[in-house]
Image (cartoon, helix red, strand yellow):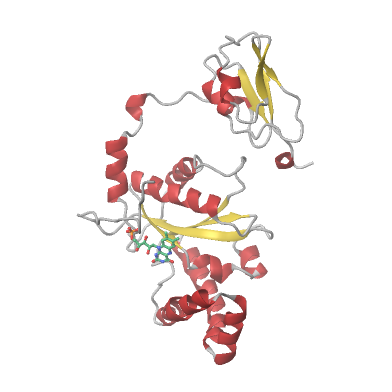
Amino acid sequence: MNEDMEWGSPAIDSSRCSVCGACAAICSTETLKMEDGKPAVKAAGDFGCIACGHCMAVCPTGAVSATGRGLAPGDAFPLPPLSARAGAGALEGLLQARRSTRRYEDRPVEKDLIERLLAMASTAPMGFPPSPVGVVVINGKEKVRELAGDLCAAFRKWRFLGTPIGSLVLRLMMSRTETALMKRFVLPIVEEIIKARENGRDLLFYDAPCVLIFHYPMKETTDPVIACSYASIAAEALGLGSCIIGTLPPAMRGSAALKRKWGLPKDNFASIAMILGHPAVKFRNGVRRRFASVEYL
Ligand SMILES: Cc1cc2nc3c(=O)[nH]c(=O)nc-3n(C[C@H](O)[C@H](O)[C@H](O)COP(=O)(O)O)c2cc1C
């Protein structure tokens, strides 16, 4: 059976265990429980270990290891000292400085930077470990330009939706509000992207040297969007510019050929994308943002 379809299995090395009980106290599935004053592994029933790794993360003596669902016994590592972690002030400064970047220097992104960014983004929380999010890295301006061409070709087929019969199709597939949004914003943007392409301008990826596509085995997009958000913050911390690109998924959706060509597993959906590169713009001010509403109840 696929490892992801089985429960994880925690193990306790009793020769190293200090019997502090921290692992049993934190285990949300009660796979680890105190028995006769010692932590013990409960046999997996209908619900078992989800491999959150928290038992390994709290153990002070390295006595607990979990295996399965993407985890291996050596996966716990010492955290960096507090002095090496961003405090609220540093993080706030980083978040305020992050902007969507649409102007890039004409040079590639170094592979070691991309790898570090992905390692940082892979720390993002996930609904149910292990993360089913996959990432395709399209690195190199020429390849990105080719991808933009393929997506524009896919978008050209959308022009049909602007016709009276297309409007009817939209109305059958979508709610009234979604149809209105589609007509008012999405189709005009798509048309602008196609026209810009014909004039040699790239309004999909802004001539960025790198595109990351976050894909997922379900249409639901929460996990990949969280991972992508982490990636955009990591990019800022690495001195790179980035911009989340929501226009890629709909263009790619429904095209098995595009997914095959651009390395997405056939059963996965392109959930969200992000462009990346060395920024050619320097932002000097922050821009104040607010949530639509915040209510304390
Ligand atoms: C889900 C999502 C999809 C986005 N898609 C696009 C896009 O396709 N093209 C684009 O130029 N910007 C895109 N953006 C970037 C937004 O336009 C940008 O975040 C917004 O203008 C605010 O700017 P800031 O990120 O600098 O605060 C997207 C952002 C999000 C969160």
Kindly identify the residue that appears in the image at 57 percent across and 24 percent down. Answer: 56
Residue 102 in which image quadrant: bottom left
Locate the N terminus by quadrant.
top right
Q: Residue furthest front?
A: 297
Image location (x, y in percent) of residue 177: 49, 75
Q: Is residue 76 left or right of residue 8?
A: left
Q: Is residue 26 left or right of residue 49?
A: left
228 relative to 247, above or below: above
Residue 53 in which image quadrant: top right
Kindly identify the residue that appears in the image at 67 percent across and 68 percent down. Answer: 256
Kindly identify the residue that appears in the image at 46 percent across and 76 percent down. Answer: 181
Image location (x, y in percent) of residue 141: 44, 63
In this view, the residue in front, 61 or 201, is 61
6 relative to 241, above or below: above
Residue 65 in which image quadrant: top right
Q: Residue furthest bottom?
A: 164
119 relative to 210, above or below: above
Q: Is residue 257 left or right of residue 181?
A: right
Give the number of callouts: 0
Q: Is residue 55 left or right of residue 229?
A: right
Instruction: Judge whether residue 35 can be spotted in this image.
Output: yes
Q: Residue furthest right?
A: 1
Image location (x, y in percent) of residue 134: 59, 51
Kindly identify the residue that appears in the image at 38 percent across and 47 percent down. Answer: 233
